[in-house]
Image (cartoon, helix red, strand yellow):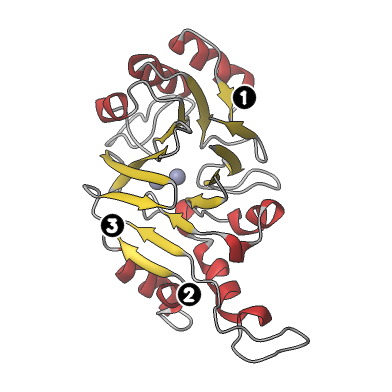
Amino acid sequence: MRITVLGKSPSWQDVDGACSGYLIEEDGFRLLLDCGNGVFSKLRRFVDYVDVDAVVISHLHADHFLDLVPFSYALTYAPRQQPVPVGGFPGTDHPARPELHVPPGATELFRRVVGAWGNEDLIENAFAMREYDPGDELSAGPLRIRFQPVPHFVDSNAVEIASTNGGGRITYGADHAPTDHIVDFARDTDLLVIEATLPRPEREGPRGHITPGEAGEHARKAGAHRVLLTHFSDELGEDWAREDAEKAFGGPVEMAREGAIYDV
Ligand SMILES: [Zn+2]
Ligand SMILES: [Zn+2]
């Protein structure tokens, strides 16, 4: 199984960057995990968007779903997606309509977002969209997908992608406060992709994110085989972040970089 980092920025993009998005490929099957702002254009560097088989969204924050909007426009209006010939493109009776697995409440939220200026059903028509129950186990091509609700400012779900061909297991923490749910869910995982948003813990109010040191600690407790820190800004200071994470993890830690590829 292969994972490509399309975007690793937190809720605002790095210079030339993108927010959360990861392309996971196994046996010719292509899954996009989160689709934050900037991700659609990065995706196109690696794969034709009509060849994406499935999209999974971890939670309903803009930096994890906003590029479903341009993705939906492409699937709806691209000349090659039309039933009749347009501009030299032959028509197609089978326009691409990838599976889209979204958290509970997404249908209503997407209608409010897109309905603010246009057709409220843009996203649900462009994709084969379905709200998952975080208790569900999904099957998508050669991949098995499981969820774990984690504490955040809104309902958020860690996502496990496991190959059914013996190709390994990736655990993606999504966005979360410190939590043992991640430790249990990621137990012995091959690759833990975990957020490292904060330079220091939130000083007041409920916690919603973790620091690089806390990320390393979660990974150590889980016994993760490899650790990839993500969801940090290019303003954070990467060397410092890596050092803190490695100290807590007790081993080497990778810092996510757009375009980086990991085989699991
Ligand atoms: Zn986020
Ligand atoms: Zn979030």
x, y (%) of residue 117?
48, 81
In the displayed structure, 248 sits above or below 62; it is above
Mark 1 and mark 2 lie on one chain; the one further toward the N terminus is 2
- What's the distance in space between the residues labelled 2 and 3, CA to CA? 18 Å
- How far apart are labels 3 and 1 at the CA level? 35 Å
- Asked whether the residues under the numbered discs 3 and 1 touch, taking CB atoms below 8 Å apart as contact, a structural biologist would say no
Extreme right residue here?
A: 88
Q: Which residue is mark 3?
A: 132
Gap between marks 1 and 2 measured at Cα = 38 Å
**Picture disc at residue 238:** 1
The one nearer the camera, 34 or 38, is 34
Mark 1: few/some/many CA within 10 Å (<14, 14-19, 20+): some
Q: Nearer the viewer, mark 1 or mark 2?
A: 2
Image-quadrant location for residue 234: top right
Q: Dividing the picture into quarters, in which one does residue 113 lie?
A: bottom left
Query: Helix, strand, or loop for circle 3?
Result: loop
Image location of residue 154, percent across then percent down: 30, 49
Between 104 and 232, the residue placed more toward the observer is 104
Give the quarter of the image for residue 5: top right
Front-most of 95 and 164?
164
Q: Is residue 50 left or right of residue 145?
A: right
